[in-house]
Amino acid sequence: MHGRYYRSSHTCKSLLAVTVTCEDLDFPPGFQFGAASAAYQVEGAWNVSDKSENIWDRLVRDKPELIADRSTGDVACDSYHLWRRDVEMTADLGLHFYRISIAWTRLLPNGFANKISEDGLNYYNNVIDGLLEKGIQPMVTLYHWDLPQSLQDLGGWTNPLIVNWFGNYARIAFSLFGDRVKTWITINEPLIMCDVPYNTGSMAPAIVNPDVGAHLCAKNVLMAHAKAWRIYDKEFRPKYHGELSLANHLIWYEPFTPEDEEITETAREYMAGRYSHPIYSKEGGWPPVIEKIMAENSKAKGYSESNLPAFTKEEIDLVRGTFDFYAVNHYTSRHTQGEEGEEFGAFRSDVPDVGAKYEINPDWKPTTSSWFFVYPEGLRNQIVWLREQYGDMKFIVTENGYARLKGLDDTDRIEYYTEYLKQLLLAMKVDHVNVSGYTHWSLMDNFEWLDGYTSKFGLYEVNFTDPMRERTPRASANYYSKIIKQRKLDICC
Ligand code: NOJ
């Protein structure tokens, strides 16, 4: 099986010919380092004040069996109360920016824009001002999977009205925080918030409806992102001069054999292209190959129209070009071959639409998350592919990190991000991709969705049995801060 793996034309040809020198491991002036977290995963305080219920608050109560340790984000890292400590940690690391997300239900308890929570407003003002006082830029995600339950009850991301609901929420966030927040992520990982819940029922809102639900969600997410970008562009950019994008979860696909190149490219279009082509390509709209496959599949299943909802000409124009950079969340890769395969992890159910089988190379080290295997070259290959598809633009790695068990001596995490950063430098220096920042996921251990607290991603370890949720820097935190200070990787000098 081993011997069958094949490197496609996208895989690091130049890497094989390049001897990496110490200068190659320098980060260019202006390159920014950050770390990330997300509201539901760290804030806790799930029902304080006027905050309302979101779809994860609901899921962990209704279906606790879905979470590995039957835990919740009710308290999580308690960042709602301990945000000062979080800010201190970002400063100790020497971060240039800290990526957080706003909990929609903390800011707008009704889900709608008719009521702003004073407590929610104070909380986010405190965090943003606290960071700025230390010279750290806030990068703010508007939506990191915690939809107001009240909007879910009205259909959530499958209801096209969410485009306006999200637009109204975004407008409020821009008007409240836009004077201080200059980098915004509209929506985090459509692939995981649409495909996984509606295909497998395993993440909120856990509604199994792969034929229709996942694709309605996909279109509405793209439209909602575009709506928010256009609102910012028209009403806020002239005075605040910020930048916005949507963050995509990108799994890199490599063919098993040369014969699998075509199916692999289709798999890339399905997983990365569906959420990229409408925004970043010159022509806009769905990737044509996916549009065709989905039309055929839908017909074969007896539907009278494609399950992939069409964009009108106006909608194509509305969505196309709504970016200021490309936000890459990347962790892992797969090998692809042209036949339907066995169930594998949360992503396997996406396979049938393109008729591909995904496998893991046995050389790729597993982590504590079932979906996550280490293949550093995947980061470079993925970014180069995106540049080839959509042209030159600015890229920011908005997430990359490593899952392991607890413990302060996390040399495997250091090895992980050193290797991924090396691949990023190769993309920048050898392939000349314009990458302006790297974000480590995560600042601290937190509620890792279906893994609960069993998979630890933090530079800081959090003691979840301590009511004060003590945070302790790991070896990887010290090493990351050294890289940031030196602005270079340490591996050959
Ligand atoms: C992507 C998500 O944005 C984040 O919430 C999650 O914790 C990490 N990946 C690790 O799975």
Image (tube, rainbow, N blue to C red):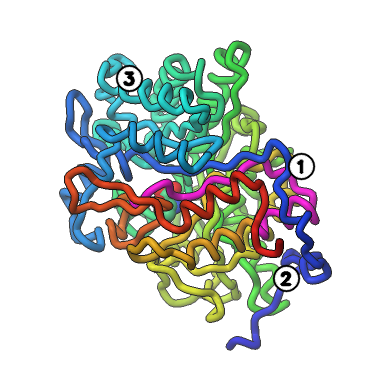
Pick the front one: 68 or 458: 458
Q: Residues within 10 Å of mark 3 (few under 14, many from 20)?
A: some
Q: Quadrant of the C terminus?
A: bottom right
Q: Which mark is residue 392?
A: 1
Residue 272 location in percent, x, y?
Answer: 59, 53
Residue density around tag 2, few if under 14, some if 14–19, many if 20 or more, within 10 Å? some
**Image coordinates for residue 29, horizontal then vertical, percent:** 72, 38
Quadrant of the drawing holding the N terminus: bottom right
Report crowding for label 1: few under 14, some 14 to 19, many 20 or more residues within 10 A (C-alpha): some
Judged left or right of residue 126, residue 376 is right
* SS at badge 1: loop
Q: Residue at x 80, y 56 (%)?
A: 430
Q: State the SS at label 3.
A: helix
Locate residue 436, reporting x and y percent: 67, 40
Does 431 lie within the magenta span?
A: yes
23 lies left or right of 215: right
Of labels 1 and 2, earlier in sequence is 2
Pick whichever, 52 or 300, lies toward us. Answer: 52
Nearer to me, 312 or 224:
224
Q: Which of disc 2 and disc 3 is earlier in sequence?
A: 2
Reading the image, the residue beneath label 3 is 121
The reply, left or right, for residue 465 in relation to residue 43 is left
Mark 2 sits on what residue? 8
Q: What residue do we see at 59% from left, 45% from top?
A: 484
- The residues tagged by marks 3 and 2 sit, at their Cα atoms, a distance apart of 49 Å
The amino acid sitting under disc 1 is Asp
Give the residue displayed 55% in from the left and 54% down from the top: 330
Q: Residue at x 41, y 17 (%)?
A: 172
Mark found first going from the N terminus, 1 or 3: 3
First to last magenta residue range: 422-445
Residue 192 showing in the rendered view:
no
